[in-house]
Amino acid sequence: MSLAQSTPGTQRAPRMLLTITGLRQGTVTAAEKMRDAARALDIHAGLVLTVQGPDWRLKDDRATLELVHDSAARGHELLLGGLGPLGGTHGKGEFHRLGRHEATLRLSAATRQLDALGLAPKVFAPTRWLASEDALEAAAKVGLEVAADAYTIRDLTNDNRHQVRVLAFGDGFGSVKWWRRNVLNSVRRGAAKGKDIRLSISAAKADKDDVAGDMLRILELLRDSGYQPANYCDYVDRQQVSVA
């Protein structure tokens, strides 16, 4: 029996959303392998982009740019993680305490640099899934349409919010065996109730066979339980239709 149980009045199948974070020169091969493995399950993973890091810039990283452009051409959603690490925020992410002005400056710089590379993400997925209210307002101000933090998917065009927490391996979350087991158990509980599921994996963790394998097993479980893949813009649009 499918874990995703239908209930009276259900209008749609439950949705699953998958992202890959931490793309850069040293992780691009693992990111591509995870992307392709998910595609084999008819799941288009979104790619979360950061513009720069210590001793690394996306514009100079040919391999990562090729993966990003190829993915976009194949229908994979691109999400903006941020401009890059901010001093003193290690472990918390770039936007978790920023005020509106500084967040606007950093998001404007990031979107401008990505636009110069032919990339135009519409979703804000802050690094480590943490952002202040001011940063979320800044994201709307610079023209981003959707924001996804650790617990919420937010339509920035009308401030509608959908409570769906992210279940992740890496990027501020764990990836050891007991953590992966807890994520699997959370997915099973959510699927039994037909809840929408958000998943994410950092490319660095996807480079480990046991971590990547456990994520793929979760994806297979959801697929076999009747879940339909979605990206964040599509998710928000469908929520609007279902409410209407």
Image (spheres, rainbow, N blue to C red):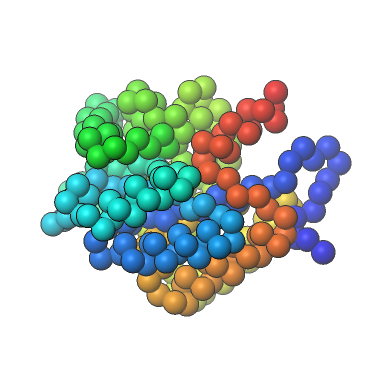
Task: Please report the residue visible at 47 percent of the width from the left and 62 percent of the height from the top.
Answer: 36
Farthest right residue in view: 8
Position in image of residue 173 (x %, y %): 42, 61
Position in image of residue 42 (x %, y %): 59, 56
- 104 or 108, which lies in front? 108
Farthest left residue in view: 55
Position in image of residue 210 (x %, y %): 47, 77
Position in image of residue 68 (x %, y %): 34, 50
Q: Quadrant of residue 1?
A: bottom right
Q: Is residue 181 above or below residue 155?
A: below
For the question of whether residue 219 can be seen, the reply is yes
Task: Please report the residue visible at 63 percent of the width from the left and 28 percent of the height from the top.
Answer: 240
Left or right of 191? Residue 198 is: left
Left or right of 103? Residue 203 is: right
On-image quarter of the C terminus: top right
For the question of whether residue 53 can be seen, the reply is no
Left or right of 100? Residue 225 is: right
Q: How many marks?
A: 0
Q: Quadrant of residue 226?
A: bottom right
Task: Please report the residue visible at 32 percent of the width from the left and 38 percent of the height from the top.
Answer: 119
